Image: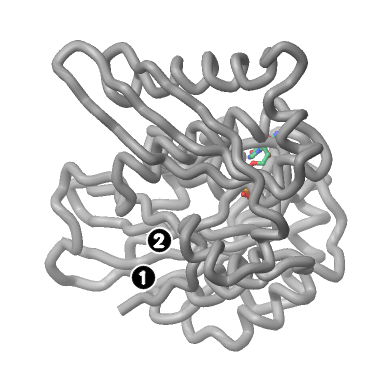
Amino acid sequence: MKTGFISIIGRPNAGKSTLLNALLKQKVSIISPKPQTTRNNIQGILTTAEAQYVFIDTPGVHKPHHELGRTLNKNAFTALQDVDVVYLIVDASQPFGSGDEFLLERIKNSDAPCFLLLNKIDRLKKEEVLINLTEWQKRYNFQEIIPISALQADNLEELLKTTLPYLEEGPMFYPEDQVSDHGRTFQVQEIIREKILYKTEEEIPHSIAVLCEEIDEQETKCYIRALVIVERDSQKAIIIGKQAAMIKAIRMAAQKDLKKLFHKRVDLELYVRVEHNWRNRTNKLQQFGYKEDEYE
Ligand SMILES: Nc1nc2c(ncn2[C@@H]2O[C@H](COP(=O)(O)OP(=O)(O)OP(=O)(O)O)[C@@H](O)[C@H]2O)c(=O)[nH]1
């Protein structure tokens, strides 16, 4: 049996979480078209007949404007240490930018072999992929360069096959049926946050946190109470909406997904609370689950 840790790192929206879910063939990380959707390092575990791959989905590396952003970047960079392989995933339909340059500098300081994954090739013509590949080749001596479409699960078998020799012989880190290192409470919070990301615009998606306060699971149904935290009164008004229409829509959408998670009816109660400037307050960041990660 071979085992190993593989970090998935990249700029916001590159497709890291889409790739993780596609590799695992199930939803472990939430996805949205909004940048900075992922806020925690999430381990997704794939156990095959030959190997256990432990993938680490990381927050998109960006220029931070808050303490939250700085913590997210730090966690992404922590995932560059002590891993067997780093996947640098880029949106191949976007031109190379200063954000890529910044990431490459950090990768150069990592000891792990780095694969470049040119993602979203479903949006490009073959010639465009080739041009992109040649451009990237000049910038760094990647161990492997693999064009993929995470969305269409294109070339992912090839990716797994190429990764296998980089893993080490050894015992599995997780039981073979485990797919994530995060538990139910985290999943509940993320599902609710995902629905808010889809339904709100501009600053709101970045300003919210979700805290699950109670999960009462009974035989035929499940009661969940969760708190949506915002930074300003005006944001609270938007989340609640006219005649509470917005919060109802969020609740209904979340309940649908939660039902799939718990395999039973879910009654979700949502409250909204203002915590001024929470993204810059260390104690609040810790309370809402955004602390700096450490790996053994
Ligand atoms: N066309 C296309 N879209 C993709 C592909 N992979 C991801 N996307 C889309 O890109 C957007 C961002 O995807 P995510 O997986 O959330 O990206 P991420 O890198 O995890 O983003 P952050 O959490 O912000 O760092 C979503 O709308 C995805 O559907 C792909 O291969 N092709």
Count of all numbered marks drawn on residues in the image = 2
Q: Residue at x 19, y 63 (%)?
A: 173
Tell me the amino acid under the disc marked 2.
Thr
Left or right for 271, reference 237: left
Left or right for 89, reference 291: right
Query: Which image quarter holds the C terminus?
Result: bottom left
Q: Which residue is mark 1?
A: 166
Here the colouring is one colour
Instruction: Measuring from the top left, give residue 223's x and y in whole percent.
Output: 31, 22
Q: Residue at x 86, y 65 (%)?
A: 97
Instruction: Measuring from the top left, give residue 164's x and y in whole percent.
Output: 33, 61
Tell me the amino acid under the disc marked 1.
Tyr
Instruction: Measuring from the top left, give residue 81's x and y in whole percent.
Output: 45, 80
Quadrant assignment for ligand 1: top right
Q: Does residue 6 appear in this view?
A: yes
Which disc, if any, is residue 119?
none
Dot 2, crowdedness within 10 Å: few (<14), some or many (≥20)?
some
Instruction: Measuring from the top left, give residue 90's x and y in whole percent.
Output: 69, 56
Left or right for 196, reference 182: right
Which disc, if any, is residue 163?
2
> Foreground: 150 or 260?
260
Q: Does residue 143 appear in this view?
A: no
Q: Tag 1, which secondary structure?
A: helix
